[in-house]
Image: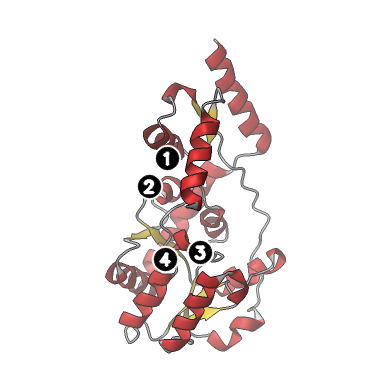
Amino acid sequence: LFKWVADKSLRRSLRRISRLYCQTATMCKRSHEVLHFPKDRIGLCPNAFSPSIQLRNRWPEELKSLQGRFLLLCMTKYYPHKNLEIIVETFSRYSDLLRDVTCVIPIDKSQGDGALDLINRIHSDGLEDQIVCIGAIPQKRLGEFYFATDVVFLPTLLESFSGTYLEAMHLERPILTSDRDFALEVCGDAAVYIDPLSTKSIKDGILMLKNSRFIREEIVAKGREQLKQHLNTWPDILRNVLDQEDIEHD
């Protein structure tokens, strides 16, 4: 019901605007195809990325007991579209093959009924050593958790633009994420892609990265290059938006 009301409200709002700006070319395309907004009135206004987060050369206290394991960091709060349930299904089905792998997720019970249900299932399936929920990570401590991480893992089903991809590239961590258009545009060749609805595909992606340092290093190297395409400043972005407006008025 909430989604239906939000959709109706958005479509009604679009009737009253002269120009729509989206964060990515993928969102521009979808806005035209799904919302039927005129293509020639859609512009691009990407996010600015400031590489302010730096790796901190120390393990966070919360993860010290996990040293020696292969660590995935799923950097998100609980939302249904983040598809966190597939992580539990994957580890439940392939717990033996993934026995020395742990996925760290910054959620806790305060994030709603969905988060509570997920945490309860982790415990009921006996996966506490393989899926660790640590609660929200303060911004100033992100560098510690990225330092301890082997792979940034996002099996998400829907994004407009995820800054986590750029953080991972900046902090030189390989990315494992969904083979979906929004991820492909931002990450390009700088990720290993999986089917976010297939536990087998996810398991294969995890083991590919775990068993090959070469692939991890290759993804990191490609990430350094891919990141250069996203180092926009807000003045540059605004200048580009105004240029698009000038073209429209001409």
Category of crowding for the residue at label 3, using alpha-carbon neighbours closer than 10 angstroms: few (below 14), some (14–19), many (at least 20): many
Nearer-N-terminus badge (1/2): 1
Distance from the alpha carbon under mark 4 to that under mark 3: 8 Å
**Judging from the image, what secondary structure is the residue with disc 4 in?**
helix
| Disc ID at residue 181 | 2
Query: Is residue 31 visible to the viewer in this orientation of the structure?
Result: yes
Q: Nearer the viewer, residue 113 or 68?
A: 113
Hey, which residue is sitting farthest right in the picture? 140
Tell me which residue sits at (69%, 67%) in the image. Answer: 138
Dot 1 and dot 2 residues touching (CB under 8 Å): yes
Q: CA distance from mark 2 to mark 4?
A: 22 Å
Sequence-wise first label, 2 or 4: 2
Q: Which residue is mark 4?
A: 216
Q: Which secondary structure lies at badge 3?
A: loop
Amino acid found under the numbered disc labelled 1: Thr
Q: Which mark is residue 173?
A: 3
Indicate the position of residue 111 as horizontal and vertical percent values.
59, 69
- Nearer the camera: disc 4 or disc 1: 1
Tell me which label, 1 or 3, sits earlier in the chain.
Answer: 1
In this view, the mark in front (1 or 3): 1
Q: Mark 2 falls on what kind of element? A: helix
Mark 2 is surrounded, within 10 Å at the Cα level, by few (under 14), some (14 to 19) or many (20 or more) other residues, namely some
State how far apart marks 2 and 3 are (Cα).
21 Å
Q: Which quadrant of the figure has residue 13?
A: top right
Q: At label 3, which amino acid type do we have?
A: Arg
Q: Is residue 130 visible?
A: no
Which numbered tag is attached to residue 26? 1
